[in-house]
Image (tube, helix red, strand yellow):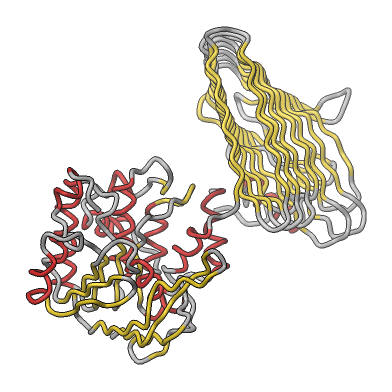
């Protein structure tokens, strides 16, 4: 194991955020770019993965060579300076026949009174036959009155027979988030999106997905599991458009607690007779019987509730 | 030892109090295998829920090993050593079979140790240990997992509410074997709500409850002959082929 403090320009609060959003406690293997308080704090390329700063705006281009296998890219962003607002543009060019893991994520620690805000536009161009696993975690901490805000936009263009799995996680701490994800799939491409969300306090979270199944035998599965506690509000929009012989499925499963509000607005459109599309949406509170069952195993009511929520979001 | 003393329980129905259990007194001795039977709607399941603390009596006292538990919560009773297997087990999205068995055992069991309990109820452990307890499991599978959680707890008193409900005939044969093994091995007492003749047949003691009252109670040898052929002691096949209880 390398030492715990490994990035010269990253302080201890930022290190904690990095651990939360990207599981980083040392220099990651493979390529990485770490952005802290609006500045590049560390960067490394690999033989197959280039990271280049954009010249016309804030952000980076990540270029992954065709045939790159079993490599990873970490590009976490952390903010610990209250009142900082930024917008970044990151483009990922993944060559044909690659197999890579991309870990993004944003952590904001706001101990002050100003709103801290990170917005990003991530564009993915996934080459033919490539496999990408993308993990994006959002996390907020700090007890300042300033809000922690993140509005991520993701645009995915998938070429023939490519495969992408996106895992988007936001568990606590982010006051306001509007996530927009749009994907276009060519023939044989397959997209899986898994979202897990927990809101509390007066937080607001909106997720909007638009998936266009353009090519023959393309498929998409959008799965959202969320828990809304206290006075928080969640909106889930999932739109799947079947423009060819394709298969699409969206599922929103939510647990509502306290005074929270949740809307699930699934929409499926078939523009081709061979498009097979399904949507499912369910919102409900924790069943009393579930709590009782765990209490008969010796858990208190609070422990039972926490266990059910943790399992649901696992 | 579990004692119920003059226990009554009622619910509000059409603005009137409807009493389900009337002034019932019952003792379950240590190391006993007791089966409670009787007609449907007679109050058997309510009695099991009163013992587990899911319902509270409107009158009377319940004591367990000398401690008055009448006002104790479900959690407190569970931690004193009372286990309760649901008639209709609960599903949990996202919670795996291993998680539930670990919660039941109250320790971080190794997967291999958790598997022992699943094998005991006739489930091939490696196929089930990582399964979610969700709608993908059949009623019979859920029921067996429910019984495994009670086995994993290994408490002084285990209460099973109609363990045969929702189980197919093949599984039912194995279920009898599970209870027989439990009877031979366990240190504590076992209380089963059932009308199944084959379960009644392995009891030390049988209690018959009808209209919220005990109508007969005693050793199996004395009680069972009078029940045969009635709805309180149906044979396994009538459950499956005659649409019996």
Of B134 and B12, the residue lying toward us: B12
Q: Residue at x 19, y 80 (%)?
A: B31
Vertical relation: B160 (above or below) A53: below
Rendered location of residue B16, percent (x, y) = 53, 70
Q: Looking at the image, can residue A288 be seen?
A: yes
Q: Quadrant of residue B64?
A: bottom left
Rendered location of residue B4, percent (x, y) = 34, 84
Q: Residue at x 66, y 43 (%)?
A: A137
Rendered location of residue B79, percent (x, y) = 41, 77
Q: Looking at the image, can residue A97 be seen?
A: no
Total labels: the figure holds 0
Q: Quadrant of residue B26?
A: bottom left
Rendered location of residue B157, percent (x, y) = 29, 76
Of A94 and B84, the residue lying toward us: B84
The answer to whether residue A101 is left or right of residue A76 is left
Q: Residue at x 27, y 72 (%)?
A: B209
Vertical relation: B166 (above or below) A67: below
The answer to whether residue A18 is left or right of residue B37 is right
Q: Residue furthest bottom?
A: B66
Q: Residue at x 38, y 65 (%)?
A: B104
Q: Looking at the rendering, in which quadrant would you find the N terminus of chain B? A: bottom left
Of A235 and A2, the residue lying toward us: A235
The answer to whether residue A284 is left or right of residue A265 is left
Vertical relation: A76 (above or below) B234: above
Vertical relation: B239 (above or below) B59: above
């Amino acid at each position: 194991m390398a030492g715990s403090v490994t990035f010269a320009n990253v302080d201890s609060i930022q290190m904690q955020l990095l651990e939360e959003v990207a599981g980083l406690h040392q220099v990651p293997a493979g390529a990485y770019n770490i952005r802290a308080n609006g500045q590049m704090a560390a960067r490394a390329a690999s033989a197959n993965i280039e990271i280049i700063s954009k010249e016309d705006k804030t952000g980076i281009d990540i270029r992954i060579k065709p045939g790159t296998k079993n490599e990873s890219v970490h590009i976490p962003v952390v903010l610990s300076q209250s009142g900082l607002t930024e917008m970044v543009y990151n483009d990922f060019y993944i060559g044909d026949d690659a197999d890579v893991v991309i870990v993004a994520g944003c952590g904001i620690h706001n101990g002050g009174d100003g709103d801290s805000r990170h917005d990003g536009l991530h564009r993915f161009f996934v080459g033919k036959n490539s496999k990408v696993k993308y993990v994006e975690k959002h996390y907020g901490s700090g007890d300042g009155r300033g809000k922690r805000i993140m509005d991520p936009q993701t645009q995915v263009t998938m070429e023939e027979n490519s495969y992408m799995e996106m895992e988007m996680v936001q568990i606590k701490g982010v006051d306001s988030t509007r996530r927009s994800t749009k994907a276009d799939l060519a023939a044989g491409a397959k997209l899986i999106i898994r979202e897990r969300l927990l809101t509390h306090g007066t937080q607001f979270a909106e997720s909007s997905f638009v998936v266009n199944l353009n090519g023959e035998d393309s498929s998409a599965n959008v799965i959202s599991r969320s828990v809304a506690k206290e006075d928080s509000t969640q909106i889930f929009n999932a739109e799947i458009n079947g423009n060819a012989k394709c298969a699409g499925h969206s599922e929103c499963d939510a647990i509502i607690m306290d005074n929270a509000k949740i809307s699930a607005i699934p929409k499926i459109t078939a523009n081709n007779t061979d498009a097979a599309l399904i949507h499912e949406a369910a919102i409900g509170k924790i069943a009393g019987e579930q709590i009782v069952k765990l209490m008969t195993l010796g858990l208190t009511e609070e422990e039972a509730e926490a266990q059910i929520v943790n399992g649901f979001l696992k | 030892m579990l004692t119920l003393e003059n226990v009554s329980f009622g619910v509000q129905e059409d603005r009137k109090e409807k009493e389900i259990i009337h002034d019932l007194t019952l003792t379950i001795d240590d190391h006993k295998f007791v089966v409670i039977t009787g007609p449907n709607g007679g109050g058997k399941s309510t009695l099991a829920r009163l013992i587990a603390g899911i319902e509270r009596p409107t009158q009377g006292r319940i004591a367990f090993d000398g401690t008055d538990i009448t006002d104790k919560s479900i959690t407190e009773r569970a931690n004193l050593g009372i286990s309760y297997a649901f008639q209709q087990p609960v599903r949990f999205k996202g919670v795996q079979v291993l998680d539930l068995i670990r919660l039941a055992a109250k320790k971080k069991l190794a997967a291999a140790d958790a598997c022992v309990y699943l094998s005991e109820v006739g489930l091939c452990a490696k196929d089930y240990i990582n399964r979610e307890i969700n709608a993908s499991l059949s009623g019979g599978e859920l029921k067996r997992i429910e019984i495994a959680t009670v086995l994993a707890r290994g408490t002084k008193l285990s209460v099973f509410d109609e363990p045969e409900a929702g189980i197919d005939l093949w599984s039912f044969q194995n279920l009898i074997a599970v209870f027989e093994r439990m009877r031979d091995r366990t240190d504590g007492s076992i209380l089963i709500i059932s009308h199944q003749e084959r379960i009644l047949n392995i009891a030390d003691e049988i209690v018959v409850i009808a209209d919220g009252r005990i109508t007969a109670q005693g050793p199996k040898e004395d009680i069972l002959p009078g029940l045969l052929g009635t709805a309180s002691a149906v044979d396994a096949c009538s459950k499956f082929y005659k649409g019996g209880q």
